[in-house]
């Protein structure tokens, strides 16, 4: 099995806030991430697919096609946006990195078969250089 990864980058703002809680409780749990006026991150997204190389191209996936798919269905939807307010697929959800990676997985699971027979293996999302989430489906 061959694993191929593509990295993309985007910037987005969000706020972690549970509307059922008081502002004080939100600050206790989420700290600066509950800032009333939002805060932002420089995210790095790494998507890994797995499969066997095509005998004619030697590719598991055409990385240009994967990049185009990621940009169209993910990065253009979230880049320089407020994840809480501007991103329809995040509506009604806590804008945590965990929930964002789940949403990305669902999008990729739906769209990946349009460009390759390779299977989605992992979606990794760095919120900061020290904080990241991995999801394997």
Image (cartoon, rainbow, N blue to C red):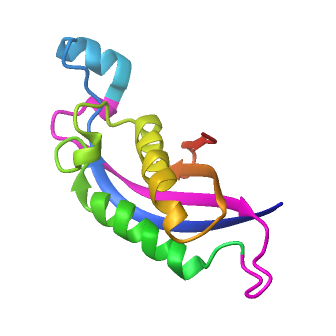
Image quadrant assignment for residue 57: bottom right
The one nearer the camera, 41 or 81, is 81
Q: Is residue 55 above or below residue 61?
A: below
Q: Residue at the location (48% across, 55% down)?
A: 108
Q: Residue at the location (22% across, 12% down)?
A: 21
Q: Position of residue 24 (x, y in %)?
A: 22, 13
Which residues make up the magenta segment? 32-59
Residue 46 lies in magenta, yes or no?
yes
The answer, for residue 108, to whether it is visible in the render is: yes
Q: Residue at the location (60% across, 43% down)?
A: 134
Residue 38 lies in magenta, yes or no?
yes
In this picture, residue 36 sits left or right of residue 47:
left
Q: Is residue 19 above or below residue 108?
A: above
In this picture, residue 80 sits left or right of residue 85:
right
Q: Position of residue 22 (x, y in %)?
A: 18, 11
The one nearer the camera, 60 or 98, is 60
């Amino acid at each position: 099995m061959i694993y191929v990864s593509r990295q993309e980058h985007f910037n987005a703002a969000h706020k972690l806030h549970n509307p059922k809680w008081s502002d004080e409780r939100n600050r206790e749990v989420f700290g600066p991430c509950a800032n009333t006026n939002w805060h932002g991150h420089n995210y790095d997204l790494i998507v890994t697919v797995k499969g066997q190389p095509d005998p004619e191209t030697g590719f598991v996936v055409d990385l240009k096609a994967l990049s185009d798919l990621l940009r169209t269905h993910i990065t253009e939807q979230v880049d320089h946006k407020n994840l809480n307010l501007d991103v329809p697929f995040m509506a009604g959800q806590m804008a945590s990195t965990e929930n964002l990676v789940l949403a990305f997985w669902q999008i990729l699971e739906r769209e990946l078969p349009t460009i390759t027979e390779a299977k989605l293996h992992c979606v990794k999302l760095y919120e900061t250089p020290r904080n990241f989430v991995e999801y394997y489906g």
